């Protein structure tokens, strides 16, 4: 019986988080009340307060969920540059398909804009990226003079700006293309020329298959829908003309 109660409690908790994510995604932290969350979740306020003491606690739970993505990194035998690229595409996919991730990212941006901003989520992401880049530099996949903490900070800041711009311009419909562009233009400045061919700015085949993205060898004209030339995602280094 105790186990059944625990299972019901967890179902209710997840319903509350789903309702909170839907509300925060739609109207942000300031525009959402606990009544809105309870209505979205289909629970009473009493049930809501049993699991979360405040709106801030709800928001923090959604923000903290983002870092469950590190489980993917933990499974990497040799985390490195491609791990960071794939992480960017996994986040792009999540922002398009997962309301809880979307709400968490929105809350991070909003909290970072307050009078007393909280840098903790940004610092956590920077640490995750840095921990992938440091061993890559040791293997010779990054130029030795690069400060990997600075590079990780740049990557996280760039992704934040890209996803916001993509949201405003296209509702994030072009986010995978923008992430591909970011890495395609970044890689030649951080990776030695003889190592460039080993990295795919559009995501590794394994990552793309898991996310349901077209294979890089796929001839379907999906790229035309975004006004892109076929095969553009595959280019790592911009082509220059004299």
Image (cartoon, rainbow, N blue to C red):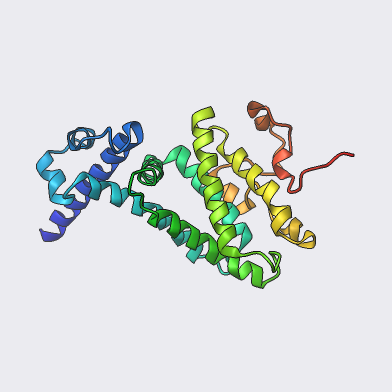
Q: Examine the image and state in which quarter residue 32 appears.
A: top left
Q: Position of residue 139 (x, y in %)?
A: 68, 71
Which residue corresponds to the image point at 60% horizontal and 70% vertical from the top-left? Answer: 135
Q: Is residue 130 above or below residue 103?
A: below
Q: Residue at x 70, y 47 (%)?
A: 185
- Residue depicted at x 39% and y 47%: 112
Residue at the far bottom in the pictured view? 138
Q: Is residue 76 left or right of residue 10?
A: right
Between 212 and 118, which is closer to the camera in this rendering?
118
Q: Quadrant of the C terminus?
A: top right
Q: Nearer the viewer, residue 138 or 95?
A: 138
The residue sitting at 35% across, 36% down in the picture is 25
Q: Could you tell me which quadrant the N terminus lies in?
A: bottom left
Nearer-the-camera pick, 106 or 197: 106
Q: Vertical placement of 171 versus 198: above or below?
A: above
For this orientation, the residue located farthest to the right is: 242
Q: Position of residue 17 (x, y in %)?
A: 27, 44
Position of 112 compared to 51: left or right? right
Return the x and y of residue 136 as percentages of the image width and height: 63, 67
């Amino acid at each position: 019986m105790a186990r059944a109660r625990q299972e019901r409690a967890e179902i209710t908790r997840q319903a509350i988080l789903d309702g909170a994510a839907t509300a925060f995604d739609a109207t942000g932290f300031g525009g959402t009340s606990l009544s809105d969350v309870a209505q979205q979740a289909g629970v009473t306020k009493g049930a809501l307060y049993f699991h979360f003491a405040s709106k801030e606690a709800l928001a923090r739970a959604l923000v903290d969920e983002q870092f469950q993505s590190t489980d993917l990194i933990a499974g990497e035998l040799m985390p490195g540059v491609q791990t960071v690229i794939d992480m960017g595409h996994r986040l792009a996919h999540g922002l398009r398909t997962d309301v809880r991730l979307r709400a968490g990212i929105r809350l991070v941006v909003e909290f970072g804009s307050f009078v007393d901003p909280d840098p903790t989520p940004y610092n956590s992401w920077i640490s995750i990226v840095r921990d992938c880049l440091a061993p890559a530099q040791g293997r010779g996949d990054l130029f030795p003079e690069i400060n990997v903490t600075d590079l990780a900070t740049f990557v996280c800041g760039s992704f934040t700006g890209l996803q916001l711009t993509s949201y405003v311009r296209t509702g994030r419909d072009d986010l995978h293309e923008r992430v591909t562009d970011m890495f395609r233009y970044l890689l030649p400045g951080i990776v030695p020329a003889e190592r460039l061919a080993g990295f795919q700015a559009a995501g590794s085949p394994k990552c793309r298959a898991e996310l349901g993205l077209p294979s890089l060898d796929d001839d379907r004209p999906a790229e035309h829908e975004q006004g892109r030339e076929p095969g553009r995602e595959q280019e790592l280094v911009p082509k220059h003309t004299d």
